[in-house]
Image (tube, rainbow, N blue to C red):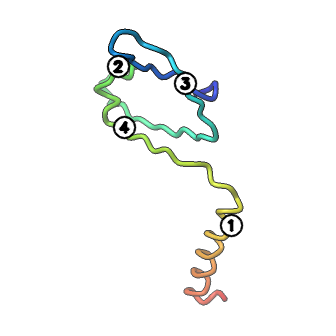
Amino acid sequence: MEKSGFYSTTNINNKNTQLEWKNVKNTLVCATGSFDEESQNEVLNPRFLRYFTLFALPVIEDEALHPIYSIILKEFLAKNNFL
């Protein structure tokens, strides 16, 4: 992902594999993991990765966030008699 994309493999009639470049823009990758204390294996194998879920969320512009948080704040202040 550090080069704004990745290669995707596509099988054509199960005979050969073709590499296709997939562009990725405006993406934030957030990942976390937890290893148990007895594990000494640093390689992430498929059995470990099956416990993860991928969420793809677009980056939200400030112009879209401002009205959302303004309404939430205004309702909170009115509810708690700050206005």
Quarter holding residue 69: bottom right
- First in sequence: mark 3 vs mark 2: 3
Q: Position of residue 26 (x, y in %)?
A: 64, 41
Asked if the residue at tag 2 contacts the one at tag 3, i.e. Cβ–Cβ closer than 8 Å, the answer is no
- Marks 2, 4: nearer the viewer: 4
The mark closer to the camera, 3 or 1, is: 3
Residue sitting at x 62%, y 76%: 71
Label 3 sits on what residue type?
Answer: Phe
The Cα–Cα distance between marks 4 and 3, rounded to whole angstroms, is 20 Å
Q: Which circle, 3 or 2, is nearer the viewer?
A: 3
**Residue that mark 4 sits on:** 52
Q: Tell me which residue sits at (66%, 73%) in the image.
A: 70
Along the polypeptide, which appears first: circle 1 or circle 4?
4
> Which numbered tag is attached to residue 6?
3
Label 1 – label 2 distance at C-alpha: 46 Å
Q: Nearer the viewer, residue 30 or 8?
A: 8
Q: Which amino acid lies under the numbered mark 2 shown in the image of this protein? A: Gln
**What residue did someone put label 1 on?**
66
* Labels 3 and 1 touching (C-beta < 8 A): no
Residue 54, position as x, y percentages in the image? 42, 40
Say if mark 1 contacts mark 4, CB within 8 Å.
Answer: no
User: Outermost residue, front direction?
Assistant: 13
Q: Amino acid at mark 4?
A: Phe
Q: Which of pointers 2 and 4 lies earlier in the amino acid sequence?
A: 2
Task: Give whichever of 15, 65 is nearer the camera.
Answer: 15
Q: Earlier in the sequence, mark 1 or mark 2?
A: 2
Q: Residues within 10 Å of mark 3 (few under 14, many from 20)?
A: some
User: Which residue, as the protein is rendered here, is positioned at the far right?
Assistant: 63
Residue 40: image tag: 2
Q: Earlier in the sequence, mark 4 or mark 3?
A: 3
Would residue 45 be found to the left or right of residue 1 on screen? left
